[in-house]
Amino acid sequence: MAPSTLIEMLDAGLAKAERGITMFSAAGETRVGYREVSQRIDQATAALSFLGVAPGDRIVLILPQGVELVTAFFACISAGAIPSILPPVSQKQDPQLYWRDIQILLERIKGKALITFPAYAVDAQQLLANGSTLVVTMPVLMAMDAPPLSRHVAKPRDIAFLQHSSGTTAVKKGVTITHAAAVAQLEAYAGSLSIRPDDCVVSWLPLYHDMGLIACLLLPVALGLDLVMIDTFEWLISPGLLFAAIEKHRGTLVWLPNFAFQHLTDIVSRERRYDLSSMRAFINCSEPCRADTMRAFAARFAGEGAGEGSVAVCYAMAETVLAVTQTPLGSAPKTFSARGVDFSIGSRIEPAGEKPSPQDFVSCGPPISGADVAIFSDTNAALGAGIVGQIAVRAPYLFEGYYALPQETAHVFHDGWYLTGDLGFMHDGELYVSGRLKDTLIIRGKNIMAHDVEAVISRVGGVKRGRVVAIGVFDEATGSDHLVVVAERSDAGPASKDLKAAVRREATRVMGIAVSRVYIAPAGWIVKSTSGKLNRKESFQKFTNPESRGLLE
Amino acid sequence: MSRTTIEKLTDILRDVFVDDTIVIDNSTTAEDVEGWDSLSHVRLIMAVERGFKVTLPPGDVMDLMTVGDLVALIERRLAA
């Protein structure tokens, strides 16, 4: 019988005893077979229950990338609890502020427990001041002598997990995913990728991000495929590790944000050739895909087995569990060369023909099975093919809403359609994404809310309160948007150089994110409405206009 | 006279971050230099490895807090 819950699906995948998870590193590798993974999950499930975790309880996981985190996540689900993975504190972020944000989030979702690593447990216990959340480490769970427990029997409509991938910690919204939605997505997406039993997923993506969690953990485990994981930081500094892992394990599927294609193209040494001939697809996902980045990647690695036909594109979001569209594997994604510069709602997209400086859009492919994609006008009326509008999605794998945030949830639904906040158009049955409507900045695959950044920077001494705008500006060198902040100086504010350093330091300290460029603007440069509301769109247009940009320091 | 590590490093930073006005000392941090984030840090490290003809262990280069730490690491590797 077809599985109806994630627990049944994972059990079926974990029954493939000959497959497993390999942690791959320059220093060597360790492999844990699915039988062993399953036993570890049983132990952790029993221990959680013994500690009083009951079905429906929310549990936050802050653990390093690896089998421990995988075990903890699946153990929570097996116990009927609702796990959510959050990122560890980033380097240079103030731990006090990090834990304050975690505490706010735990209070909102009424978190029952935090599972973390021993080095964090002491901090967590001290800094989570109210003490209502149980703090527990994996070594403790794994050593606990708890009576065995059979897997919880969930109902398809029960919540399986929360995905907190958008925004900075305190204001992160928990995308609520049911068992039914997770199963429907995994089945539909596996179908569109024509998954084979010998597929092998290789990934350095963090599991607190939807692409890492769904494509590079749930999909391979639920389908009983081999999975090779690489630590994110180790990959960043030695990107060639990804190719070494593919070569050694005959990897077939890899998901990457656009900047990672650029990083691999720029940094991987030409002195070492890799055999990438086993690869079925490098899938560009989670930040806008650029035609030039894909072409450069395919040209650079074609000789090693990763030419044009091995790159693919997926349009995905946590709110649909993951994929909405996917280009067919085995052929290069189509591109559309458009005339003009106006790609706002209601504009008709015309082919550029012989006109100079066209804008190249890369196809994200046709909708995967079950997904309905529509293009909406300003008033949420459906627009025809070739016209730009807001992308709206309906699917059996749509999320239930943002956990404990009914207002935020109501804002993004219209008549059963999820309003993505992305702009795009349909052409020949395929979706092309052309921009953003929402004030979400996508920086290297990470979703950052512009107003969060602005609120933090607004409090920096020397910055004029409320006169800050955060924008994403495409950077050719990295193949991703850069986070750019424009701030006006308060009267008697410090010199520009010092103020810029202060802005960058505060963004790192409070949010753990790097601001790539800071510009100091003369008074009145930032555009506000008569009611005092920041006009981000017009401020951005001023930034792209050489004349008004010339006024910035 | 041979140039000091920090002088040579200044040139490398100016080159990587495309800014000839960059001035650094041992207490300079990434926040003091426009565009210095985790991704460009990798480019900087590659440029440092080429410029000084040293290899820097991946485990060490992500833990550097100041330019002084980087100078110390380079000098340790040069002496090794």
Image: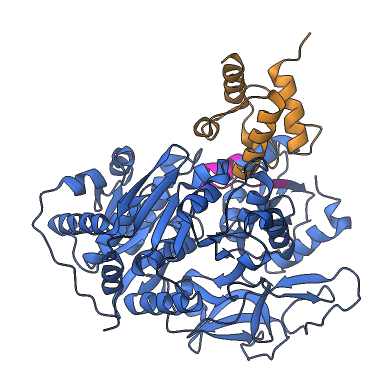
Chain colours: A blue, B orange
* A352 horizontally vs A152: left or right: right
- Asked if the stretch drawn in magenta spans residue B7, the answer is no
Residue A480 or residue A130, whichever sits in front: A480
Regarding residue A172, the answer to whether it shows in the image is: no
Q: Position of residue A454 (x, y in %)?
A: 61, 55
Q: Position of residue A98 (x, y in %)?
A: 43, 46
* A471 horizontally vs A509: left or right: right
- Asked if the stretch drawn in magenta spans residue A513, the answer is yes
Residue bounds of the magenta highlight: A505-518
Regarding residue A130, the answer to whether it shows in the image is: yes
Q: Is residue A421 above or below residue B70?
A: below
Q: Position of residue A406 (x, y in %)?
A: 41, 75
On the image, which quarter does residue A156 sit in?
A: bottom left
Residue drawn 65% across the image and 68% down it? A309
Q: Position of residue B68 (x, y in %)?
A: 60, 22
- The residue lying furthest to the top in this view is B1
Residue drawn 19% across the image and 70% down it? A152
Residue A546 or residue A420, whichever sits in front: A420
Quadrant location of the N terminus of chain A in the rendered image: bottom left
On the image, which quarter does residue A524 sit in?
A: bottom right
* A124 horizontally vs A343: left or right: left
